[in-house]
Image (spheres, coloured by chain):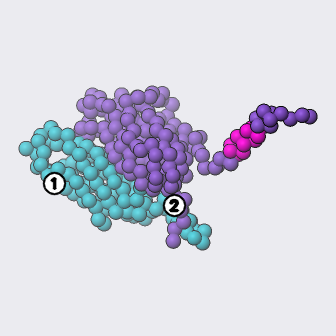
Amino acid sequence: MPTTRRQFLSLAGGITATGIVTLRPLRATPAMLNAAIRNVVGEAQIRTGKVKLDIPPLVENGNTVPMTVSVASPMTAEDYVKSIHVFNEKNPQPNIGNFYFNAFSGRAQVSTRIRLADTQKVVAIARLSDDTFWQVAADIVVTLAACTEEMN
Amino acid sequence: MAALINVPPKAKRGDIIEIRTLTSHIMETGFRHTADGRLVPRDIITSFTCRYNGAEIFRADLFPAIAANPYLSFFTVAKESGKFEFEWIGDNGYSSTASAPITVE
C-alpha cells in the first residue's frame, strides 16, 4: 500500500494525540470536584456571575498562591452572602476552604493563600441569603507543584 | 503559638474595616511521604473563627489545600468599641487564640 506523506503525518499525529491522553495523570478528578460541589450545593442550580476570583493565572510555586474571592453584594440584613466555598480540580482533595459571613461582615470578601498541586481549575461558589448559588472558575498554570515533594 | 493580627486600632462608627490574621502552623497535608516512603500524617488547622464582642462575624473551614502559616483577611463593620477574638482549632487537639482591641468613635 503506497503511503503518502500526508497520510503518514496524519497517522503519526493521531498516535501522538492518543499517547498524550493515555499519559494523563490519574490524579485528575473532575468527578470528585463535582461531588464536592454537590455536597455543598445539593440539587440547587448554580448560576455564573456575581463572584470574583482574583488569583494569578501563572504561578511559579504552587505551595503558596495568593487568592481573593469577593461577591458583589450590599451585605444588608435582607441581602447578604452566607458563605463562599472554594474548590480545585486536581489536588488530592477537592476542597480548599469554606468561608462563612453574615450581615455584619460589611463586605463579602476573603483573602488567603492556597496550595495547587498541578495546572488546574479553581472554582468559587457563593451562597446568598436567598439561598441562590453563584459561581466563577479560573484556570491557573502551575510550574512548581505543591504536595508532591518528599519530606526530609 | 505566634499569631500576627492586624486590626485598625481606631475606626469611625459604620466604617468597613479589614482584619488580617496570620498564624504559624505547618499545615501538613497528609499526602506527603518521607524519603523512605512513609506517609507523613495530616496536621492542619481545620477551623478559624473571629468574634466581635462575642458575636461571630467570620468563620472558615480550612483544608490541606490552604498554604502553611494560614493567612486570612476579611471585613466587618465597626459598630462599637470592644475587642475581636480569634480562635484557630486543628488536628491533634491544636487550639490557639488571640485578641485585638478596637476603639470606635
Kind of residue at disc 1: Pro
Q: Colour of chain A?
A: purple
Which residue, given by chain and number where applicable, does mark 2 sit on?
Answer: B30
Image quadrant where residue A73 sits = top left
**Quick check: B44 above or below A29?**
below
Dominant secondary structure (helix, strand or loop) of the stretch shown in magenta:
helix
Residue at image location 68% in from the left, 43% down from the top: A21
- Residue A82 in the image: x percent, y percent? 34, 36
Chain that bears disc 1:
B
Chain that bears disc 2:
B
Answer whether residue A28 is magenta in the image. no
- Residue B50 in the image: x percent, y percent? 27, 50
* Quarter of the image that includes the N terminus of chain A: top right
Q: Secondary structure at mark 1?
A: strand
Q: Colour of chain B?
A: cyan
Answer whether residue A15 is magenta in the image. yes
* Residue B101 image label: 1
Seen as rendered, the residue at the extreme left is: B105
- Depth check: B9 or B78 in front? B9
**Quick check: B11 above or below A152?**
above
Seen as rendered, the residue at the extreme front is: A5
Q: Residues within 10 Å of mark 2 (few under 14, many from 20)?
A: some
Q: CA distance from mark 2 to mark 1?
A: 36 Å
Residue at image location 20% in from the left, 51% down from the top: B7
Specify the segment rendered in magenta. Answer: A11-22
- Residue B68 in the image: x percent, y percent? 40, 59
